[in-house]
Image: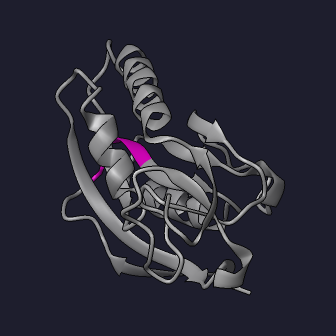
Amino acid sequence: MHPMIKEILISENEIVEKCKELGQKIDQEYQSSQPPLLVALLKGSVPFLSELIKHIKMDVEFDFMDVSSYEGTESIGDIRINKDLDRSIKGVDILLVEDIVDTGRTLKNVKEMLFNKGAASVKVVALLDKPSRRVVEDIHAEYIGFEIPDAFVVGFGLDYNQKYRNLPYIGVLKDECYK
């Protein structure tokens, strides 16, 4: 375990098993329609996307958006688009791949942007859900890996000031790292 991690909340094996389960649910949901375009939010969702697509059996395409709304440990509520999609999504079903649903602000804004670009539908698959921090009440993920308590977590793509993304598990960061 990394010395700055207080505890491992979700192991690598648990993440892989959950991705298998989510992949099966996504395959079932879209079996009678066109596969969705997976839109992953950079940078945090990349490990989750990489593991998840191994377990989706249908042919899928994916693209990336880079949006930011955090400074340190807090969501600032101001969404900046650093990288937009590379293709048109008019009439396309979107499956938004997110590392964590926290306040809901980023997700709300991104979903609105995707609908404004002409998406036929937008659903969300999130590795983690932290409902205790939700500010935007009507935002949720259709597919959720794990519901977690209000702790500052890192690993498997999640970071603190760009560090700890490469940890193969989800861990709780020691308080002295950010306070």
91 falls in the magenta region? yes
| Residue 123 visible (yes or no) | no
Q: Nearer the viewer, residue 76 or 71?
A: 71
Residue 105 falls in image quadrant: bottom right
Q: Residue at x 29, y 61 (%)?
A: 64
Q: Residue at x 58, y 56 (%)?
A: 171
Image coordinates of residue 53 in percent, x first then y, are: 27, 36
- Please determine whether, in this image, residue 29 is positioned above or below residue 91: above
- Please determine whether, in this image, residue 171 is positioned above or below residue 29: below
Image coordinates of residue 92 in percent, x first then y, are: 31, 42
All told, the count of numbered labels is: 0
Left-right relation of 99 to 78? left
| Residue 152 visible (yes or no) | yes
Q: Which residues are magenta?
A: 89-96
Q: Nearer the viewer, residue 6 or 140?
A: 6
Q: Residue at x 43, y 26 (%)?
A: 17
